[in-house]
Image (cartoon, rainbow, N blue to C red):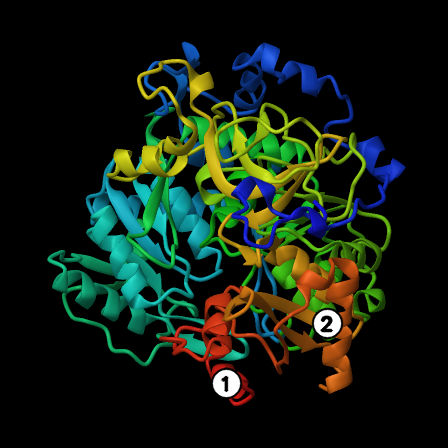
Amino acid sequence: MSDENINENEEVSEAQIAVHWKEEEYFDPNPKFIEQANLKDDEILKRMGEDNFPDGFEEYAEMLDWDKKWDQVLDASNPPFFKWFVGGKLNASYNCVDRNLAKYKNKTALHFVPEPEDEPITHMTYQELYNKVNEFAAVLRDYCGLKAGDTVTLHMPMVPELPITMLACARLGVIHSQVFSGFSGKACADRIVDAKSKYLITMDSYYRGGTLIDHKEKADIACNQAAKEGFEVDKVLIWQRYPGKYSAETPMVEGRDVFVNDILKDYKFAKVDPVSLDANDTLFLMYTSGTTGKPKGAQHSIGGYMAYVTGTSKYIQDIHPEDVYWCMADIGWITGHSYIVYGPLALGASSVIFEGVPTHPDAGRPWRVAQELNVNIFHTSPTAIRALRRVGSDEPAKYDYHFKHMTTVGEPIEPNVWRWYYHTVGKDEAVIVDTWWQTETGGFLCSTLPAIHKMKPGSAGPGVPGIYPEILDDDGKPLPRGSNKAGNIVIKNPWPGRMLTIWGDDERFVDQYYKRYNTKPDSKDWRDWPYFAGDGAVEAPDGYFRILGRIDDVINVAGHRLGTKELESAALMVDEVGEAAVVPVPDPIKGVKPHVFVSLKPGFEATEALAQKVTDMLASEIGPIAKPGKVWIVPDMPKTRSGKIMRRVLGAIAAGKDPGDVTTLANPQIVEEIRKQS
């Protein structure tokens, strides 16, 4: 949409967001990759096409071992509460552990990489994982008295005891709710109370950025806060970072706290038969962390979820049993559940768990790990890629590792950053998949098929097999296919990986994801229930979708709709810029103006000329309307513990407002440094 076609005073709809990113060139997948790929036949697109819905998804379900096969692929009689593989019975723990023993018992299941480089990497075989999962399942069943359908909250860092705990819960049918370790005790309490977990499982300490953090203190805060809200935690089970040694300063609470290592002695070599569970029983809760309102517990099934993450791990991630696969996400997020634990282990792969910060002690750390473990599949977020590019753009060339496949996940990736990832990290060898999905969806929704589709920087790609996306305008009318016009992306059909509902709140589930585009609330036809993701997107003529970010992440400058992601992408085209964040700031004339925050790559200094260079780049790439109200060159961005830039804090600073509580940031001191510039 050109600037001159917009009346400055006219209200522009969500579906008319101005899209200024250029179409990018294609990159072909490496022939060597295609040769070995799990999926190189585009017949999959027919097998899982709309004409064969829902039966095409049986292909994923058949990758699992079932105690009893399903009677019905999809029960859509009560939309949007869809049920998959109805009548089927299985166990997730069995599918990730037991069934791998026949072929792979002496093969590594988990490589644990501690943050301190002087601590050795540990390699846990499938047989060792089987023993540990059984022993801890016996603790949960016999010591704790837990059974199928009970809930347990975990607040654990990136250590092998986390997947052991998850798989032990899954063995019994106990519903696990893992809280990201970087979240506060209060955030943990909110999730304990909502899930009604009588048991909290945590760890005394873990490493982060060179410091051994006292994690146990958060358990005390969580239990005390839950008690204030009228909910008592019976027991806190504490794994020790160093077995036999307590590494936290916070004292144990008598009668409530117990060391897992002490109890395990009584359950040595215990065996627990996996409980056969219904496909539509609940495997886990994963709370989405909204900035406002009560956290939403995405309630994921056993059968549909396991089928979907196993199928997408095999076809999109191209995981083979002989691969060493490293997803750098945290298991506290859905990416870690789906693509560190359940998907890769169901396929018998070796999955890497990395305790620390990828840039600590320096930006060469990930590539040293990749070299040592011979990692050949690498999976991370644009946030991490930008950070590694910023502080160590030349580091990958120093190490002898070779990836066949790389993933980007979590947010749109700017084309410039994509190219660095491809050329420098992937050494022009690896195929990249740029995946779009959400906590609620269980697994990938849009991505290229790595051996079949060409790659295009900045574009996620088409819907993955079995997923039929569409772009709608605000009135629910489909935009013409391939029109490159921006609107709201929906998924037209149900799929097995999607959550069953929001835990304890069916009404909120319908309101949040289905109400906007459902015109017939009494309809029993799944076609009347498109899933609304809350993201803006465009579909190019080639059928590839480009995700523009959350619909809220749009700045209206004098009637011109500008996506923050495209502004940030333009700023990152300035060679000196390592990271960029754009926030809307009130302006008396334009209504709102974008303010651009940039942090520089090492070796560059903040100057007015550099700020002008950023301004000029936005004007030349997008147009004069994109000129920022101010360019802030900052020493670093305020970030969460997971590395996400806190744009809310930057927006408050730029507007001269109180940024609120910043104590939970990874680097709270940076806020004051930035404020001094205002």
Q: Position of residue 123 (x, y in %)?
A: 59, 55
Foreground of the two, 24 or 80: 24
Which residue is denoted by mark 1 in the rendering? 675
Sequence-first tag of 2 and 1: 2
For disc 1, the neighbor class at 10 Å (few under 14, some 14 to 19, many from 20) is some
Q: In the drawing, does residue 90 fall left or right of residue 612?
A: left
Determine the residue positioned at 62% across, 40% down.
486
Residue with the most extreme bottom position: 676
Foreground of the two, 49 or 57: 49
Residue 390: quadrant of the picture: bottom right
Q: Position of residue 501 (x, y in %)?
A: 34, 34
Q: In the drawing, does residue 233 fall left or right of residue 639?
A: left
Residue with the most extreme right position: 31
Name which residue type carries label 1.
Answer: Arg
Which residue is denoted by mark 2 in the rendering? 615
Foreground of the two, 157 or 51: 51
Instruction: Give the CA separation, mark 2 to mark 1.
Output: 21 Å
Determine the residue positioned at 75% across, 78% down.
612
Determine the residue positioned at 14% across, 60% down.
229
Q: Which mark is residue 79?
A: none
Labels 2, 1: front one? 2
Residue 58 visible in rendering: yes
Q: Position of residue 319 (x, y in %)?
A: 67, 38
Determine the residue positioned at 57% across, 54% down.
559
Q: Position of residue 470 (x, y in %)?
A: 58, 29
Judged from the image, the secondary structure of the residue bearing numbered disc 1 is helix
Residue with the most extreme left position: 230
Question: Dots 2 and 1: beta carbons under 8 Å?
Answer: no
Residue 437 visible in rendering: no
Foreground of the two, 228 or 197: 228
